Image (cartoon, helix red, strand yellow):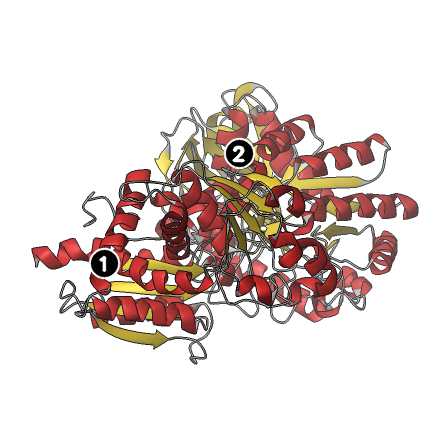
Amino acid sequence: MTGSPMPAGRHRHLISAADLSRDEAVLILDTAAELASVAGRPIRKLPTLRGMTVVNLFFEDSTRTRTSFEAAAKRLSADVINFSARGSSVAKGESLKDTALTLEAMGADAVVVRHSASGAAHRLAGWVTGSVVNAGDGTHEHPTQALLDAFTMRQRLGAPDQRGGGLDGVRVTIVGDVLHSRVARSNVLLLATLGAEVTLVAPPTLMPYAVETWPCKASYDFDAELRKSDVVMMLRVQQERMTAAYFPSIREYSRRYGLDAGRMALLPEHAIVMHPGPMNRGVEIAAEVADSPRSTIVAQVSNGVIVRMAVLYLLLGGAAAAA
Amino acid sequence: MNGAGTARNGDGMAEEWLIKGARIAGADRVADIRLAGGVITGVGEDLSAPGARVLDAAGLVALPGLVDLHTHLREPGREDAETVETGTRGAALGGFTAVHAMANTEPAADTAGVVEQVWRLGQQAGYCDVRPVGAVTVGLGGRQLAELGAMADSAARVRVFSDDGNCVADPLLMLRALEYVKAFDGVIAQHAQEPRLTEGAQLNEGEVASRLGLAGWPAAAEEAIIARDCLLAAHVGSALHVCHVSTAGSVEIIRWAKSKGWQVTAEVTPHHLLLTDDLAAGYDPVFKVNPPLRTHADVAALRAALADGTIDCVATDHAPHPVEAKETEWAAAANGMTGLETALRVVHLAMVDTGLLDWAGVADRMSARPAAIGRVPGHGQPLRPGGPANLTLYDPAAPAEAVDPAAHASKSRNSPFAGMALPGQVHATFLRGTATVLDGKVTR
Ligand SMILES: [Zn+2]
């Protein structure tokens, strides 16, 4: 986060997971844990952001992420405006700047933005006075996804009292189309900050250039990594990667890099299986794996709302208190 | 200006000038230069010229007028970004006396009619000689050769042909083009970019693009085309010019081709001599250009190659764009940077201040060599009596000043050097004996 009212006083936006120090990341997770205990009680709505406006600005369809942010903002009593810029008649390229000016006029306190272009959230932050939360920019980052993944890992693998703790020594294997994955980029950065040991697994064609400069390891051998994984995170692979010759066929991809029951059996007993969704059942993950007790996929969705509440609370809460 | 400012192209109505005490690049001495009738009438100590205007050039370096092999003037078609008049005014302010106008206009400069139109617009503007570049293929479409001979025979006397913006990717078409232009001493200037290897490419394929999630533009996509084209040029004994070389690997290939004695020449842009891909970290598309900014290692190799002559010359690839083309997310933004008004200062910083080139070297790489490659008559010649009075006076001691694109004559503001302190100042430019720039300002 870059710019003000986090208790740390440093941040106005959340654009990249790299912006978070360990203390800041842990604070978000702890705040989420606090909110989770509140959310369990009958009164599900907090007055924290009453009178503030959060705009969901989605240039790409993503019902699951948009509704997650919407629920998070509403539970904090913010006013939510869903602004779907997709299909608008504004010419591509002009739309982001023009939309930013519109949001300014509407007095948005926070803008949650999803865009197909890497760097869109970064650019937007230069054009609006409110906070910008990156809800996924192209193939760059998706920091709240990484935070909810880390929260889920800590919940499932951490010590009984997880408050204040990171993910030290947790071995996380992220598998699939790493090259085009904003989820992978944000996870690598955040998990390294929290002390986890990350290994990326992908066919060489889908491994990012200069991955050796990233704070993680990289491997082409899925089976070898499975045995030493506490967490396996499967990434969605898109059909169009095949037509661009990243791999020969979906079936071959699935055989080499898909997680089926046979591979799941190689995992240590305590290991969990994650997926950011939406899943291609039968491609990167077999249905019996997705539906197994190891799978945290449903928990990830509910944790998403809580973690996004924590992010909005920490970005805007200080401002609300001061007002 | 004695009314001489209305002179078209400086021809016939040239002013008389006595330039006192300039350091002549290449001659290694301080001398006076006398201009009359559009030619240099004297170079020596204590010259006199009654009636001539006197310019005190103490501390200034005299260079032959700069020649740019690669300028996008945008007219016809995109007069919102630049016109021949505004672009050449900027060129004169940058010390240029001749520029090559690239063919990717709307309509493309692929017929005698369009190249003559651009050539005439240049004459009317009168700031510098405009040499239109002809398209290699119809509409820069890469399918059918344009009427290269008609453009060569036109009033514009086209000698450089390029589909710049696009690569002539079809090897057969490239081979034929190289061979065909031999009939009129033409040269094919290639924008070397393998299209399939750069689909959707946004930034140099490297550590920075990978981290930023921007699709990579691999060095090999440039190098593969350069290697291929060198072989094709050698095969038919033709002249190949490589536009905007941007990688260390390209330098090695060109060095090898030259060692074979093949007719291969190359240019490098000022921005590739100074800037690197890490500038893209803030996603500001002012740093988006094609070929992309590369790494520090590439910059070092390009500088060394320009110094040792492997790369023949500096060419600006001046590519003006309206504000809205850059005020977007990175992927949606246009490629290109303005460069005419900063080129010499950037070369000063990157090449002279580093000891890689002296001013004689600058004169060679920014005037003599590009004029020779472009077959430009009357330009790029040493400052000698009898030679054409095309020259630039540059003040290398002017204190470094931050670049302010708003102050540029170009219609566009997309300078990647904005806010950067660059040394030196172009003090005056003369086109055939007529001052187009004096005291760092255009004369009209
Ligand atoms: Zn080009």
Q: Judge the density around disc 2: few (<14), some (14-19), many (≥20) Cα neighbours within 10 Å.
A: many
Residue at (60, 53) in percent of width and height? A264
Label 1 to label 2: alpha-carbon separation: 63 Å
Q: Secondary structure at mark 1?
A: helix
Chain of the residue under the numbered disc 2 shown in the image: B
Residue B421 sits above or below residue A86 on the image: above
Farthest right residue in view = B235
**Residue B169 percent location from the top left of the image:** 77, 58
Residue at (53, 47) in percent of width and height? A269
Q: Is residue B327 visible?
A: no
The nearer-to-camera label among 1 and 2 is: 1
Residue B27 - label: none
Quick check: B131 left or right of A320?
right
**Residue A211 percent location from the top left of the image:** 57, 41
Q: Is residue A223 visible?
A: yes
* Residue B198 in which image quadrant: bottom right
